[in-house]
Image: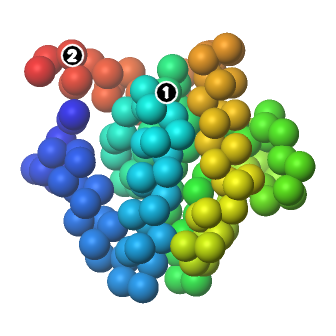
Amino acid sequence: MPTIEGKEGRLWIDAYVKKAGEFSGVMKAVRALVKKTAADCEEYVSPWKTPAFDSNGPLCVFVLGKEHVTLAFLRGAMLADPEKLLEGKAKGVRSVRLRSLVDVKRPGVKRLIAEAAKLNKKDPPSGKMVGMDKRRKTEGKK
């Protein structure tokens, strides 16, 4: 895993989660859910200094907000969302606001993660994602 601010990425993310205060538990639950649901995913720190996951391309990121944790899907506009959890109007990105462990445990959240991973496996993202080439080159030097 590449380093950021002199730390291994995983350790940087551990510290990010620990600093989340009341939302630390929500972030731990999100992190565990993504790793369990998209078992082949790789955790890393995005170029925007957010915890992120890659599974055949960028999958999702999570970010601490003042009143919630945002779980953003980089190809969210392409995901089926029967529970209407996704928010946003950007060209591709959609996100879910998670305020509690109850929110993380909603079946729709797990389904969105699974569908995003399935989409990336079936149709890997094309185009250049900012920082992806650099990250992969750094990993290759291990």
Q: Which residue is mark 1?
A: 55
Secondary structure of the residue carrying numbered label 1: loop
**Is 108 drawn above or below residue 136 in the view shown?**
below
- Relative to residue 18, is residue 69 drawn left or right? right
Count the numbered circles shown. Answer: 2
Task: Tell me the mark number nearer the camera, choosing from 1 and 2.
Answer: 1
User: Would you call the spot at circle 1 few (<14 residues within 10 Å), some (14-19), or many (20 or more)?
Assistant: many
Q: Is residue 52 above or below residue 59?
A: below
Q: Check disc 1 and give the amino acid type.
A: Ser
Left or right of 33: which side holds 122? right
Identity of the residue drawn at 57% across and 77% down: 100
Query: Which picture quadrant has residue 120?
Result: top right
Look at the image and tell me whether residue 93 can be seen. no
Q: Which quadrant does the N terminus fall into?
A: top left
Residue type highlighted by circle 2:
Gly
| Residue annotated with mark 2 | 140
Residue 101 x %, y % = 55, 73
Q: Residue at x 10, y 50 (%)?
A: 6
